[in-house]
Image (spheres, rainbow, N blue to C red):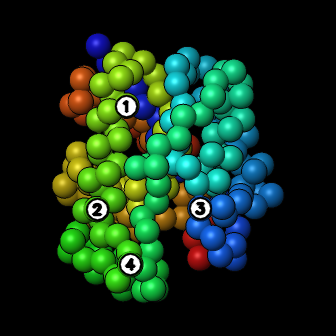
Amino acid sequence: MTTRIYFVRHALPVQEHADDRTRPLTDEGLADSALVRDFLRDKNIDVFYCSPYKRSLDTIRSAADNYNQEIKTDERLRERESGPGKNNYEMFRKRWADHSFHEDGGESISMVQKRNIAALTDILKTNAGKNIVIGTHGTALSSVLNYYDPSFSCDDFMRIIDWMPYIIELDFNNTTLISKTEHIHIEKKHN
């Protein structure tokens, strides 16, 4: 029995908005969320899960509305907690070279991966055989992809960093990944 998950990385947010949790989508990001809705329209989605962050919720909201479905939020699906360090290429390389590295007050890739995989495992066990959408973030999604494919590296993370939104399909047999397929992405400037 195959369980299919469409991970949807959020559309373009308002970068200047200081609070990560309440950061909204730009007008352009809201318009791009219609592409997410249109892609998912014929995918027979049974359930929607999401990070509790506004930008992720707003990216999948019209798709969930199309199915008359509520979005279930899970705190474990949130984005990496940032410390005072800068999000630049050097810091990305450092974090991906050492998955346990984190700034004071921030989270490491390993920490993000652990909680995202715990949430994903629960979702898979609760929804076997269903088609699922999970609204997510760049680092959170990358940590999941790295868990199933340890060769997923900083270069892979950098390849998708400007893709907002981005949809990748992962198919599972129980909790074992059996295939992955990249679908749509729209390239936007990250920062």
Q: Which residue is mark 2?
A: 111
Q: Residues within 10 Å of mark 2 (few under 14, many from 20)?
A: some
Three-letter amino acid code at the position of disc 2: Met
Q: Along the polypeptide, which appears first: circle 1 or circle 4? A: 4
Q: Which residue is mark 1?
A: 123
Q: Which residue is drawn at the image coordinates 35% and 83% (left, top)?
A: 104
Asked whether residue 89 appears in the rendered view, the answer is: no
Three-letter amino acid code at the position of disc 3: Arg
Q: Along the polypeptide, which appears first: circle 2 or circle 1? A: 2
Q: Along the polypeptide, which appears first: circle 2 or circle 3? A: 3
Q: Left of 103 or right of it: where is 169?
A: right
Q: CA distance from mark 2 to mark 3?
A: 18 Å
Q: Left of 47 or right of it: where is 173?
A: left
Secondary structure type for disc 1: helix
> Where does residue 38 sit, x and y in percent of width and height?
68, 31
Q: Is residue 31 depicted above or below 107 in this figure?
A: above
Disc assigned to residue 21? 3
> Where does residue 25 sit, x and y in percent of width and height?
71, 58
Q: Which residue is mark 4?
A: 105
Q: Which residue is drawn at the image coordinates 47% and 35% (left, top)?
A: 6
Q: CA distance from mark 2 to mark 1?
A: 19 Å
Mark nearer the viewer, 2 or 4:
4
